[in-house]
Amino acid sequence: MVDSYEQLANAFVGLADTLVADYDVIELTQQLVDNSMSLLPIAAAGILIGDARGDLTVIASSSEQTRLLELLQVEVDVGPCLLAYRTGKQVLVDDLSVDRQRWPAFAARAAEYRYRSVSALPLRLRDERVGALNLFRTEVGPLSPTHIAIGQALADVATIGILNQRTLTHSDLINQQLQSALNTRVIIEQAKGVLAERGNLDMDRAFVLLRSYARKTHQRLADVARAVVDNADTSAILDAGRM
Amino acid sequence: MNDSAPSGARARFLAASATVPEIADGPVRLCAASVLALPVQRAGIATHAPGVGLEVLAASDEIAERVEWAQVMVGEGPGLDAIFGDGPVSVPNLAMAERWPVFLSEIADSGVGAMYALPLQMGAIKVGVLDLYCDMPTRLGAHDFADAVAVSDLVTAILLTVGRDGRMTDSLGPWWDQPLGTREVHQATGMIVAQLGIDARSAYARLQAFAFGSGRLLAEVAHDVVTRLLRFDPDDDVGTDLESAEPTW
């Protein structure tokens, strides 16, 4: 149960500490599970993470008991966790005995293990979906909005950590990509300006001409833009707009 | 939130960055969250890359925005020193600072009393700077300063989130959405390249010089160039303000 803000803040700090240290995704997700167990009125928790192909893997759980792992494993194929992962939205099931047709295998297995309600919270940051956090209860009925908000906030911190770990692992490559992206967007804006001035166009029109010329000549947009800014002849690009 | 929570700055920042509903997703939210999490009143983020230079990414309010743009226009300031130096730059009393004379005279009437510039860096990846402002001269204690560093690490982590395959997408994502002013500065530079037949770096310098000389914000001058109220003529030493120019027809 959440006894105090201090407990919650400590949980955040613990998770957030992992964001800038060298750590393991397994440790991070296990910490998320442990925090959920101590802060929320739940019986069990598990985390599934998506791999490069978008398939889920069980990566952490509150207990090593086979039954929980098996239950989570069923969810790899179909269940609230997979739905939360795919849609990036919370999937809250107050009573697993209602609407058993939705996920028959999952509902049956959960009933065997006496889990009667589940909340699946997405691990996502904006458009980047990483996985999902499953919170199981033996009672029927929803987690309170406050508890769901806490669970989601913990999941959000963990998501940043997981995404961050990818950055640290690929730091040289990321740096190159970042520099390239930043340079590219500047040069494109500058090229729009050159074309706008030479052709007496607005910026949107200038961009349309730039892009269609790049496509027509099978060049990268950034390369065409760079040539434009380096004072290449722009008549071909602008003439296309006058036709 | 309960201020007595130990090292609560990270928690406050994360909670704020997730739930400031009246502010759209994006870098402005990171500034707003920094202000909520720390004992400062304003925040700005500027990015920096070789070949690109300093660009304003976001600010918590108009005053922070002005100061960020001032750094970009004059090319000096605590934020730039933080980017090129070894670590954060603390200016507990801007009025008493002995460095950055041009920057300080630009922001003299802005209403900021103290500035803390925290580089946004992860390993070898340098992203830019998080500038924190206090309205009154303020010396941040060790604890608050550590909190500020922690928040800057979180901002860096968020800006550098990458996709499943370990790549940043070409579009960089919503945390990198630039304000119109930054884009118009580059567009105006391109227009000046065409107007004067000079290279981009020189064109940008002309734009900065005009803004500085006319006492106007760089972004405003850029906007005038883009909307064709101002143009640069090879025969003039300075730009021509077309609003007050004689019509030629």
Image (cartoon, helix red, strand yellow):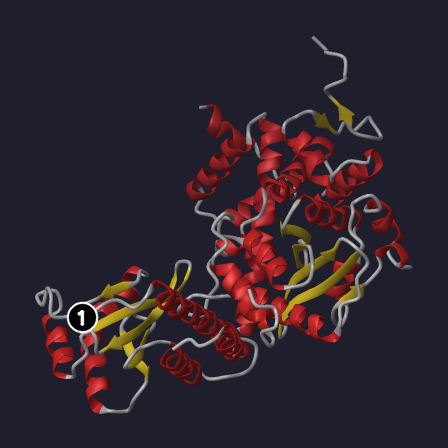
Res. A194 image quadrant: top right
Horizontal side, residue B46 vs residue B238: left or right: left
Which chain contains the residue that carries disc 1? A
Measured as percent of width and height from the top left, residue B42 is found at: 68, 54
Kindly identify the residue that appears in the image at 19 percent across and 81 percent down.
A71
Kind of residue at badge 1? Val
Q: Residue furthest top?
A: B249
Horizontal side, residue A3 vs residue B154: left or right: left
Measured as percent of width and height from the top left, residue A96 is found at: 15, 70
Q: Which residue is mark 1?
A: A78
Measured as percent of width and height from the top left, residue A212 is found at: 44, 38
Res. B205 image quadrant: top right
Q: Assign the N terminus of chain B to one quadrant of the image.
A: bottom right
Q: Is residue A130 above or below residue A60?
A: above
Residue A190 vs residue B84, the one in the foreground: B84
Q: Is residue A228 above or below residue A146?
A: above
Measured as percent of width and height from the top left, residue B191 is found at: 66, 34
Q: Is residue B214 above or below residue B82?
A: above
Residue A180 vs residue B212, the one in the foreground: B212
Horizontal side, residue A179 vs residue B221: left or right: left
